[in-house]
Image: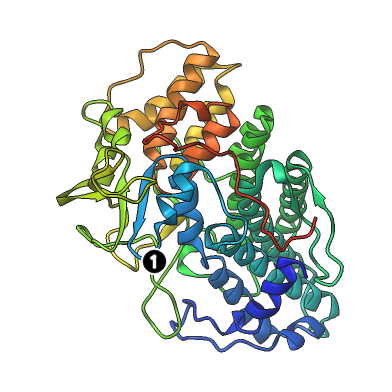
Amino acid sequence: MKIIKIFLITILSSVMMISCEVEDGKDLNGPSIESISSDLSRGELRDAVIGVLSDMRIQLGAQTDGQSVAGREYWRVASSDPRWTADLLTGILDDNTFYTTNPYAARYATIKDINLLLEGLENTTETFSTEEIAGIRGFANTIKAHELLMVLNQQFENGIRVDVADPKNLGPFISKDDSLTAIFNLLASAATDLSNAGSEFAFPLTSGFSSFSTPASFLEFNNALAARVEAYRGNYTSVLTLLGNSFMNMAGDLSTGIYFTFSLDGADIANPLFFALNATSNVRLVHPSFIADAEAGDTRVGKAVLRSNPVTVAGPDGVPNSGDDLEGTHDVFIYSSNVTSVPIIRNEELILLSAEANHITNPTAAVAAIDVIRTAAGLPAYTGGTTPDELVTEILKQRRYSLYAEGGHRWIDLRRFNKLDELPIDRPGDGIFRQFPTPANENK
């Protein structure tokens, strides 16, 4: 049986029971899957949306760690599992273990939540207005596109399944390029719905969407995601159009955006990317190159905090002090507590996407966008070359420091510019990989 079927059946039995923040701060006990899909009521809609937003966070830590280790942003050390510094640094990956199967299954479980919601909308006898229905579809398909992109970011040239509406009759794997096209088209369809959704949604959103909780403002989020997809496809004219319709603001707060939120209440979850400083058994150690390659005065280096004691990690042979150990001197520290929010997409990334989209046809605009980021980081204006290759080098450097440890962006970025060979090899026997394997139980 295919892994999507296996995991969806087990996960979906409880997904709607997960607590998540709502406007009144109360925990939710969700409706049954059958009642949602057969006839969606207003109350079930509210609970189903909160369930979707809650489940988006499941395995966020594992996926971010896997991609960040792949991109040599940091070393993930767990005393209970040496595979973080064995498999993921050697590039010899297992197709039937946690770093492969867990993020994959979690993303498809959220997609299944969304498909059930959309099925219930088709079958509803509730008196939703035409605008409300458009808003529900626009929200649901925007989030579905995000989740599919998360799967594709790991699977890359393996391709992914986009059509999984019927777990008993899954659609085929389609290529990377076709997957990106399908994701973009899904966002475009959602954008049309959001444009016709009136002034309010028929459901609440979490505080991570506090500035994007109406159809019009949520559309700005949709356009921001679509700009990311188009950058991945190299469609730069489209990127600029989408950014112009997003929440990008060259003079605005770089942290403005959409966030995953966390709490310690009820059945909710804590931020999985937070570790206390100087931890020992579970640690994220800054890759030394992040500090060594930084420009003097770059305030973003503050995301690396010096440990009171270095951590030594044995090499592939598992024998400490055998000449191929890793030594980490700094902790990754970008989230100050276990309830700090984690960005989905924010203004700083959008400004850098603008720089990228202009780097070939309008280098002056590209440099202006770069300088917004450099100035915010305490750096002087850019004085380097302005050929496309020179600007790409600078843009990737700014993305490296601005988006550090937020989602494995460096691995994705170097891969899409065919620069993975620039990543450091830390030990004899280590290697770089381009994608995670398709899970073993996914019969292609």
Of residues 326 and 373, which is closer to you in this image? 326
Nearer-the-camera pick, 120 or 334: 334
Residue marked by disc 1 = 271
| 73 shown above or below 31 | above
Q: In the rendered picture of this protein, how many numbered marks are placed on residues?
A: 1
Left or right: residue 199 versus residue 27 is: right
Amino acid identity at mark 1: Asn
Residue at 48% over, 78% down: 23
Q: Residue at the location (79% across, 42% down)?
A: 178
Quarter of the image containing the N terminus? bottom right
Q: Which residue is drawn at the image coordinates 21% and 29% (left, top)? A: 297
At 62% from the left edge and 34% from the top edge, which residue is drawn? 231
| Vertical relation: 315 (above or below) 392 | below
Residue 423 appears in the rendering: yes
Q: Is residue 89 above or below residue 147?
A: above
Local crowd size for mark 1, using a 10 Å CA cut-off: few (<14), some (14–19), many (≥20): many
Q: Quadrant of the C terminus?
A: bottom right
Tell me which corner region of the image, top left, top right, bottom left or bottom right, holds residue 283.
Answer: bottom left
- Estimate the x, y position of residue 424 in percent, counting from the top left: 40, 31
Q: Is residue 296 left or right of residue 10?
A: left
Task: Locate residue 397: give its quadrant.
Answer: top left
On the image, the x and y values in percent for residue 56 come to 56, 65
Check disc 1 and report its element: helix, strand or loop.
Answer: loop
In the image, farthest residue toward the left? 308
Quadrant of the image occupied by residue 204: bottom right
Residue 407 can be seen in this image: no
What percent of the width, then of the height, locates residue 287? 32, 40
| Residue 185: image location, x then y, percent | 77, 47
Q: In the image, is 382 to the left or to the right of 436?
A: left
Q: Nearer the viewer, residue 421 or 337?
A: 421
